Amino acid sequence: MRATIISPIYVRDSDYYDLGTAAIATAISATKRHQASVIDFAFVWSQWEEHVKKHLLKFKPQLIGISTYSPKMPLVLNVARLCKEVLPGVKIVLGGHHASLDTLETLKQDCIDFVVVGEGENTILQLLDTIEDNPGKGYHNIPFLAFKEGDKFIENPLGKLPTAKELTEFPFNDWTLWEHHEKSIFHSGYLPVIGVRGCPYKCSFCSSPILAERLSGTGPFVRQKSALRTAQEVAWQWERHQKHGLRYIMFYDQNFLISAKWLEDFCTEYRRLDMHEKLPFSCYSRLDHLTKEKLDMAKAAGCIQLRVGIESGNQEVRDKLLNKELSQEMLIEKMKLLNDSGINSLGYFIIGNPKETYAQAYESFKVAKELKLNRAAFFFLTPLYNIPLQKDVKVNFLEMDRSLGFAFPSTVTEGLSGFSKILLILLFYRANGWFLLKNLFTQLRKRGISFLLNFPGYYRIARSDGFDFEQSLLQYAYYHGDSFLY
Ligand code: B12
Ligand code: SF4
């Protein structure tokens, strides 16, 4: 059978890859029994309807899978409706975080036939086999699947999540299935890889603990793929994609430094493969996981950037609202360790939290500067399904007005924080703008005039790939210029 997996995004932005979509397409294609294609909106977001039509009429899939995030549900449903219009009779399956959590409401939508709960590699294969061998029957036997039978909505029992051993045996992600992978690698410079799935913490703004609860009884939620195989995947991706401009690896593990032993095994193998000389990497970590030993090990293996969630500069907001479990002393001590390590830092902050005052939100900007972060990114609080931080706010995810793009404070977040929307937007631009300028000046200082002289050449290519001036400048500053190397 032929299956097309779609990764929709709302606005032009730098979300080049969706690892979940790629993992599902890779699993399908690796069977050899079925074929997969991927539709990626990254370079076509302004004419996505035309693009989807063309792709579907050419590939003619019998099953279409769409990846879901809470803030993207209205777009996901529009995409699903268009697919049914273009290929009447095609079956549509949703997977990913939102559909896994709000399974029944998602399934109730007319344009949706199936929902896969949790990690979908095994379920999608069982679904494809069943549709081909036994159409209309046999769905009851597929764990993690929800489906329609007449006017009934059936949610099958959940099965077992892939174990660490099974994750290790999954095929490496085949990015050649990813539409526009050459352009994506050229503009971003990176490919994503994941070693450890799941997270044991319970931050109140995050979907991960809600998913862990939804999947309880299915086996351990945090699983570490073999460190050796993770390093080998990077080497494999490097061999295939250095010609496209691959310049670093972005690890998507939520906590790359969670285990000293795993990190040591990974770094040893990475160095044995000489990858530390060829391909640097960037990874996420909680600050409380940092030790000098881990940082030294990671640095020697080629880690050039650590991305850390600080979320707020104000301890009360971190403790009482965000459940971040990070004291001010720990924040300062660990940031000093990170700054001393020579690894670049990128700190993430959330502004516009419920009842947060302007002074508290401003403190995040102030602290980000004091901590001497190389880069900081400030986001508005995004409504996500059932997160404790928004339990008092009723959100209809299927109908949210996201016409301004999901990163903008919409009507949903209006009135949520303790100050006005306009002040929130001004702070957003001020804080992000300050770090963008810092970044540009740092690169100018380090790279000299060539940094400026190379921009027109990059801009020509970026324009032909559909970027406008503003996006080209941001891309150049953040990706093409490899800003975090400095
Ligand atoms: C890395 C990351 C990013 C990266 C890259 C995005 C990506 N998905 O690759 C960046 C920084 C760009 C990003 C951006 C955003 N992210 Co993000 N991101 C993550 C993170 C840390 C890891 C994702 C990952 O790669 N996991 C590994 C892969 C293998 O797992 P997976 O994606 O879950 O996919 C599996 C299943 O979900 C399922 N599946 C997924 N899609 C499909 C489709 C089908 C058809 C099927 C059958 C199954 C299936 O099978 C997959 C394989 O097992 C997660 C945290 C987490 N807990 O996972 C948050 C997370 C997924 N992000 C989240 C959000 C909200 C966003 C943003 C909307 C944030 C924003 N406000 O801008 C954007 C949107 C991105 C976009 N593409 O439009 C939320 C989603 C929660 C929710 N309820 O929707 C999470 C859970 C974090 C959180 N805050 O709670 N993100
Ligand atoms: S540590 Fe990160 S992934 Fe884990 S619950 Fe907190 S925000 Fe979510």
Image: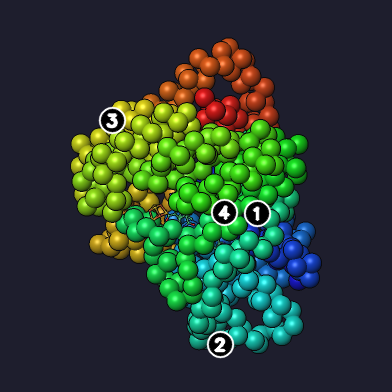
Separation (CA) of disc 3 from disc 4: 34 Å
Q: Earlier in the sequence, mark 2 or mark 3?
A: 2
For label 4, the crowd category at 10 Å Cα-Cα, with few meaning under 14, some 14 to 19 and many 20 or more, is many
Quickly name the residue at label 2.
150
Separation (CA) of disc 3 from disc 1: 41 Å
Mark 3 near ligand 2 (CB under 8 Å)? no
Q: Is the C-beta separation of discs 1 and 2 under 8 Å?
A: no
Separation (CA) of disc 1 from disc 4: 9 Å
Q: Name the front one of labels 1 and 4.
A: 1
Separation (CA) of disc 2 from disc 3: 58 Å
For label 1, the crowd category at 10 Å Cα-Cα, with few meaning under 14, some 14 to 19 and many 20 or more, is some
Please tell me which residue is depicted at 51% across the width and 43% down the height of the picture. Answer: 283
- Residue type (three-letter) at the residue carrying disc 2: Gly
Q: Helix, strand, or loop for circle 3? A: helix
Quickly name the residue at label 1.
229
For label 3, the crowd category at 10 Å Cα-Cα, with few meaning under 14, some 14 to 19 and many 20 or more, is some
- Residue type (three-letter) at the residue carrying disc 4: Gly
* Vertical order, 483 against 105 (above or below): above
Q: Name the front one of labels 2 and 3.
A: 3
Q: Name the front one of labels 1 and 2.
A: 1
Q: Helix, strand, or loop for circle 4? A: loop
Q: Is the C-beta separation of discs 1 and 4 under 8 Å?
A: no
Separation (CA) of disc 1 from disc 2: 45 Å
Tell me the number on the disc at residue 195.
Answer: 4
Quickly name the residue at label 3.
366
For label 2, the crowd category at 10 Å Cα-Cα, with few meaning under 14, some 14 to 19 and many 20 or more, is few
Q: Position of residue 130 (x, y in %)?
A: 69, 81
Q: Position of residue 253 (x, y in %)?
A: 51, 51
Q: Earlier in the sequence, mark 3 or mark 1?
A: 1
